[in-house]
Amino acid sequence: MSTREPRWVRWTLIAVALAFLGLNLALPLAAVFAGALAKGLTVYRAAVVEPDAVAAMRLTLTVAAIAVPLNIAFGLAAAWAVTKFDFPGKALLISLIDLPLSVSPVVSGLIYVLLFGLQGWAGPWLRAHDVRIIFAVPGIVLATVFVTFPFVARELIPLMTEQGRSDEEAARSLGASGWTTFTRVTLPNVRWALLYGVLLCNARAMGEFGAVSVVSGHIRGLTNTLPLHIEILYNEYNYVAAFAVASLLAGLALVTLVAKSLLEWRYGDQLTGSGH
Amino acid sequence: MSRRALAAYRLSFGAAAAAAAINSVFGLLVAWVLVRYDFPARRVVSALVDLPFALPTAVAGIALTALYAPAGWIGHLLPVKVAFEPAGVVVALTFIGLPFVVRTVEPVLADLGVDVEEAAASLGAGRWTTFVRVVLPAIGPALVTGFALAFARGVGEYGSVIFIAGNLPFRSEIAPLLIVQQLEQYNYAGATAIAATMLLASFAVLLAINLLQAADRRRMAT
């Protein structure tokens, strides 16, 4: 009578699982860094400080710097509304929050082109007022905000649902205003889940490709984010430069993974609320 | 044009289904190994599983293409051509969809009490029988959900696929690429039509899976 597999079975399963992960996850990661350094450090540095690459870096950072705080605000607002109140249309809002995750990034970009493109709904009006959204930075920001919206909200909602309203009700009964309740009761309760959501949101914001590719216009030095710049380099057969720039984003991904793991390890129960 | 679209749908949906199936098998294995066993660097491996979530799709795309190209580390070992063929799309979607299955199955597996397995063992069931008749049914819904999530993500995936796909119309062109193509020719109607078809089809598949799971839940409850 045994509830454990024989040792040889266990180690075979572990070996197969590790082989699969090594093949599918570790090797591609290694290939990025190997490709980046294939011609040595000098070529690597040159690719990274090249003006178009720097412009792409600056655009990626700018877009993230706008999109992430916006989605922190939207995510907090949505999570707060959904978990602390009841209102008609609440179920619809919850479904809408997940919408960006279920559509193709290309379709997300398409939505904005249909809305703000030259032939789109708002196209003629925008043209008349000389406002450029599609094929300019605002379009990239909008598309990025859309695709990264769910990450903060989805981290907060389960935790805030579990935490309930009692803390907030207690604060209100002691005379705290709505804003004070929010900043001194609600926010501290969810700070680690918020940070976790911000990490995921940022990783996606800096790495988004499909949606941004559709709205950006690919104007070198102006509307190319880092991922788009990587595509251009690769299509020009400039592989080492492409991998060099890609290694920056891969490095960011590794930092995200480490930070994520640290948060899970130290504050795991405060992320899911299961510690209550 | 519509024949080209049909070919694109076939590739996108077919490759996504194949990749999700592969991920269901190996994702379950990975989840099992992570939950039930302890081995050196288990934490690192667990963190690595989230790599496809954190890594930008374009980076994954060029890395996979470099690996599976005829001259690549893996490509030169394989007897068949993978990069720039439909098989390459399956490889890319396998990378993308893996965390969905693992992360959906893991908590359910972890919550599974040992007592049911002990009961099965005391009645004389071997480990394999116990696995097939006790564990699998219990995690079945989670596995199906993981498959559905990986499938849905795979159908719409763009960045990690377009580098390895080959992008030849009728042969290795995915549906999202066709949408981008139509947009570049300012054929908004065509692009929207393809997008709408993809959304409807994905919705239908997910609805079917949800209904299956609801029926399964009802059956288990009686």
Image: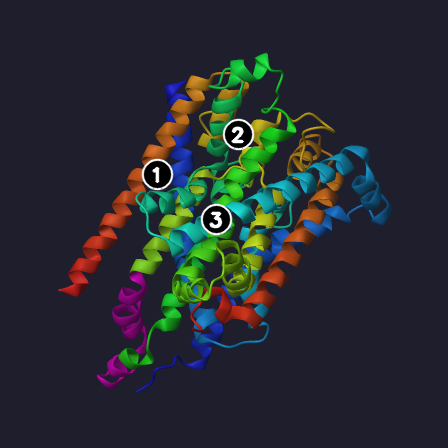
Tell me the distance, in whole angstroms, between the alpha carbons under discs 1 and 2: 22 Å
Secondary element under disc 2, as helix, strand or loop, is loop
Q: Position of residue B116 (x, y in %)?
A: 27, 78
Task: Please rate how many residues cluster around mark 2, counting C-alpha atoms within 10 Å: few if below 14, some from 14 to 19, many from 20.
Answer: some
Q: Are marks 1 and 3 on the same chain?
A: no
Q: Is residue B167 above or below residue B203?
A: above
Residue type at mark 1: give it. Answer: Ser
Parent chain of label 2: B
Q: Is residue B184 above or below residue A203?
A: above
Q: CA distance from mark 2 to mark 3?
A: 42 Å
Q: Chain of mark 1?
A: B
- The disc label shown at residue B202, or none: 1
Q: Give yes or no for residue B172 being in the magenta stretch.
A: no
- Amino acid type, callout 3: Ala
Cα–Cα gap, marks 1 and 3 = 29 Å
- Give the residue number, with chain letter if any, for mark 2: B167
Dominant secondary structure (helix, strand or loop) of the stretch shown in magenta:
helix
Q: Secondary structure at mark 1?
A: helix
Q: Is residue B46 above or below residue A117?
A: below
Q: Is residue B130 magenta?
A: yes
